[in-house]
Amino acid sequence: MEIAAETVDTICAVSTPPGEGGISIIRISGPDSRTILEKIFRPKKKTTKLPGGTLRLGYIFDPGNGADIDEVLAVFMKAPGTYTREDVAEVHSHGGFAAQSSIIKAILSQGARLADPGEFTKRAFLNGRIDLVQAESVLDVIKSETDEELKYAVNYLKGRLSKKVNTFRDVLKNALAAFEASIDFPDEDIDIDFSGHLALLKKARKDIDDLVSSYYEGKGLKSGFEVLIAGRTNVGKSSILNALALKERAIVTDLPGTTRDLIEETLYIKGMKVHLIDSAGIRTPENIVEEEGVRRVKEKASEADLIVWVLDGSQPFSAEDQHVYDVISQYKSIVIINKSDLTRHIDLNILTSLKITSYIEMSAKTGLGLDEAKSLIFSNLLKAGRKNSLLITTIRHRDILKKVSHNIGTVINGLENDEYHAELLAFELHEALHHLGEITGETCSEDILNTIFSQFCIGK
Ligand code: GDP
């Protein structure tokens, strides 16, 4: 890697969020951490030296005039057993703007510089404590809003994806060694049997393709899935949205065609973020405003991760219902038959003739069947089998894995057709290994690193 693994200067930043708070943590990392802390910290109980790893009560003072700035707890932690693998000092001050900025000024006056965004984590990566996937997951952990999201981010932080990538790397390296042996000794009659490698390459490619396709769910976990509630007017779309969101947000009305715009509500279904979008009834537009509404519903239908098609169970299936079906049938959808508190007049055989097997009956009015509706939405968004395995949550990882899959595919084809140049296949394997290194950071350019770490805040 082109990047120098050694860092020589000492950096500092406030690591807690800006603004008022009970406490604020200021972090210092680098070779001068201890000296700097000793020059601005006066422990209440005098000791000759700050013991490593122990929080001490005392005062941070202005080294210029000796005046106390704030009463704090301070700790020094010796390298390499620290976040950055460098000497680290932390000052836990009171969480106020003046206290924070005066302490930072005192630290800077002793030769530290202000850290760049994500620089502590970048140093942890450059010093080999974590790889790039783990560094990226620090940001994911910080940004997690739901339990599901946090679970996957912590798995990454613990190195689950890195381990998987390393198993792919071992398969590729072993196959490469076999190719290179056949290239190095072309004239010698060593009959290298590639069948074992072929099987392992196929397995690796399948696992990689599974990871690539898991991005759809990974992305949804992070930014939320879009679920469009579609159906003709008055079937109860707004009421269902309200019942699911447990908030009276959409305006419910008896007049057909009044929910003309798209109304969105974000909710959590079993710890998963879902953006529920209520649509104008899809029906033949009667005026300009409705026409625009219908156009937007059609557009949303093509973008949504799932469509919940609502039918009114108390009414016979109508031409308007059929019209909605015609619009949404090409997309992934589930069916809710609403108003189950009223006498049923819909003929459920219509669903059979439309080849719809997955539906539930509910009542937005009484709440009956609401939990089943949530479960049906959940299971259609997140494949049940995937729940405890790995997911790709960043487009960077997905794009790299796609390239690796392509490289391995070429090698598999070559081996299967038995007409290949070992040099070419070795080249593909080298490429694939290079790409895998971009995931964990071994073969990553400074530019990519800067892009990744610039997404962090200062102090991380
Ligand atoms: P939308 O046009 O599809 O959004 O339908 P609304 O949510 O505005 O509901 C239309 C009418 O049906 C309103 O008068 C609701 O109170 C009523 N409604 C909605 N859901 C139910 C239900 O489950 N049972 C009954 N009895 N009425 C409902």
Image: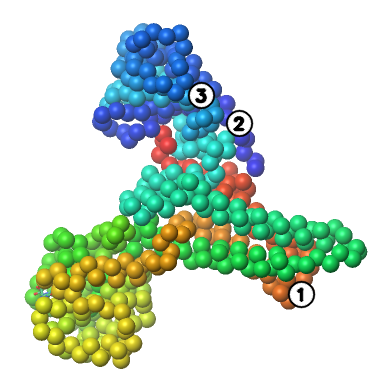
Circle 1 Cα neighbour tier, 10 Å, few/some/many (<14 / 14–19 / ≥20):
few
The residue under the point 45% across, 56% down is 393
Please name whichever residue, 269 or 26, is drawn nearer the observer in this view of the structure.
269
x, y percent for residue 41: 39, 14
Q: Are marks 3 and 1 in contact (CB under 8 Å)?
A: no
Q: Which residue is mark 2?
A: 6
Image quadrant assignment for residue 378:
bottom left
Image quadrant assignment for residue 357:
bottom left
Give the amino acid at mark 3: Lys
- Which of the two discs, 3 and 2, labels the residue nearer the N terminus? 2
Circle 3 Cα neighbour tier, 10 Å, few/some/many (<14 / 14–19 / ≥20):
some
- Which of the two discs, 3 and 1, labels the residue nearer the N terminus? 3
SS at circle 3: loop
Q: Which mark is residue 200?
A: none
Screen quadrant of the C terminus: top left
- Foreground: disc 2 or disc 1: 1
| Image: 315 above or below 419 | below
x, y percent for residue 201: 65, 65
How far apart marks 3 and 1 lie (CA) works out to 57 Å
The residue under the point 78% across, 67% down is 193
The residue under the point 54% across, 22% down is 31
| Image: 160 above or below 102 | below
Q: Which residue is mark 1?
A: 418
x, y percent for residue 291: 23, 78
Give the amino acid at mark 1: Asp
- Foreground: disc 3 or disc 2: 3
x, y percent for residue 400: 56, 58
Q: Is residue 346 visible?
A: yes
Number of numbered discs on residues? 3
Q: Which residue is mark 3?
A: 78
